[in-house]
Image: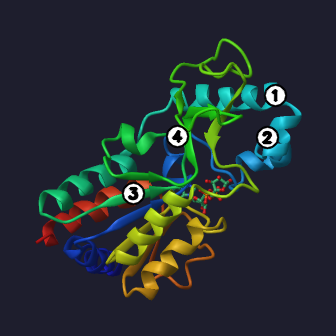
Amino acid sequence: MAEDNLLNEIAAIVGRARRPVAMTGAGISAESGIPTFRGKDGFWKDEDVTRLATLEGFLADPHKVWEWYDWRRSQIRQTRPNPGHFAIAEHERLVVGRGGSFTTITQNIDGLHAMAGSHSVVELHGNIWYSRCLKACTTELTHLPSTPLPEYPPPCPRCGDILRPHVVWFGESLDPLVIEESLRLAGEADVMLVVGTSSQVYPAAGLPYVTKRAGGMVIEINLEPTELTYSADFSLHGRSGEILPDLLSRAREFAE
Ligand code: APR
């Protein structure tokens, strides 16, 4: 009963929001079969971050890093969006259809939000299906949709030098335009749904506080408490693939 009343209270807030934002992390893709990073079976438990997810590591052994990213690509290729992704895409359609705005700001590089039908998606950490010239002979991205790749590292189709994955590695800064856009969206959001992130990696982890400072509501959905839980207006603990469809279908009842 208490859970039901709480869900309806939160659903009313989400349903009435005109500029809601969803900020997602690896946890939303966990139910699609993609491991998280810091969970008990997370990537970083067994893999050497410095060798696989830094520019230095890439320059030291681009073959090995591409081999690992292409393995991750082949894993992701076998996955599909889950009900959590679809619920967010559906809520975007509802809000935009009623003259509001809805954007998903994601830390994920798997492309599953777009595959679920989300149109307005800001990819903070890049996208594993794209690459760019290491020598920056052009700012254009090279789309690498198929896996496995014929060779590691793949050559730049323009200058013949090597391509690097279009992802943000540790020690690298995010694209300033992407940061600017996500800060603007967070500052204008009347509600931010923070889904499946440990809220430890900045600048993403700072976005909910931008929303709070601007007077918006922060609603966390996570399997367990995180760094953000104490500051969130509401924190729902459970699987996002179960909570989001329920919460957002209730929110539909309150949508104006
Ligand atoms: N539903 C909801 N939350 C979940 C689920 C689920 N089914 N499964 C796991 N979680 C939660 C975990 O409790 C954890 O808090 O998702 C969170 C995943 O946290 P991380 O593994 O730290 O992933 P994330 O926060 O996205 O990492 C941020 O760090 O490694 C870098 O660039 C990488 O984008 C990544 C960034």
Depth check: 142 or 136 in front?
Answer: 136
Which numbered disc covers residue 104? 3
Label 2, label 1: how many angstroms apart (C-alpha)?
8 Å
Label 2, label 4: how many angstroms apart (C-alpha)?
17 Å
| Earlier-in-chain disc, 2 versus 4 | 2
| Earlier-in-chain disc, 1 versus 4 | 1
Q: Which residue is mark 2?
A: 52
State yes or no: discs 2 and 3 in contact (Cβ < 8 Å).
Answer: no
Label 3, label 4: how many angstroms apart (C-alpha)?
14 Å
Q: Which residue is mark 1?
A: 64
- Give the crowd class for mark 3: few <14, some 14-19, many >=20 residues within 10 Å: many
Look at the numbered disc 2 and give the secondary structure of its residue: helix
Look at the numbered disc 1 and give the secondary structure of its residue: helix
Q: Is residue 158 above or below residue 132?
A: above
| Earlier-in-chain disc, 2 versus 1 | 2
Q: Is residue 224 above or below residue 129?
A: below
Which quadrant of the render holds ligand 1? bottom right
Label 1, label 4: how many angstroms apart (C-alpha)?
20 Å
Q: Mark 3 belongs to which amino acid?
A: Thr
State yes or no: discs 2 and 1 in contact (Cβ < 8 Å).
Answer: yes
| Earlier-in-chain disc, 3 versus 4 | 3
| Earlier-in-chain disc, 3 versus 1 | 1
Q: Which residue is mark 4?
A: 110
Label 3, label 1: how many angstroms apart (C-alpha)?
32 Å
Residue 3: image location, x then y, percent: 35, 76
Residue 234: image location, x then y, percent: 43, 80
State yes or no: discs 3 and 1 in contact (Cβ < 8 Å).
Answer: no
Which residue is found at the position 49% from the left and 52% from the top?
28
State yes or no: discs 2 and 4 in contact (Cβ < 8 Å).
Answer: no
Depth check: 48 or 125 in front?
Answer: 125
Which residue is found at the position 44% from the left and 84% from the top?
212
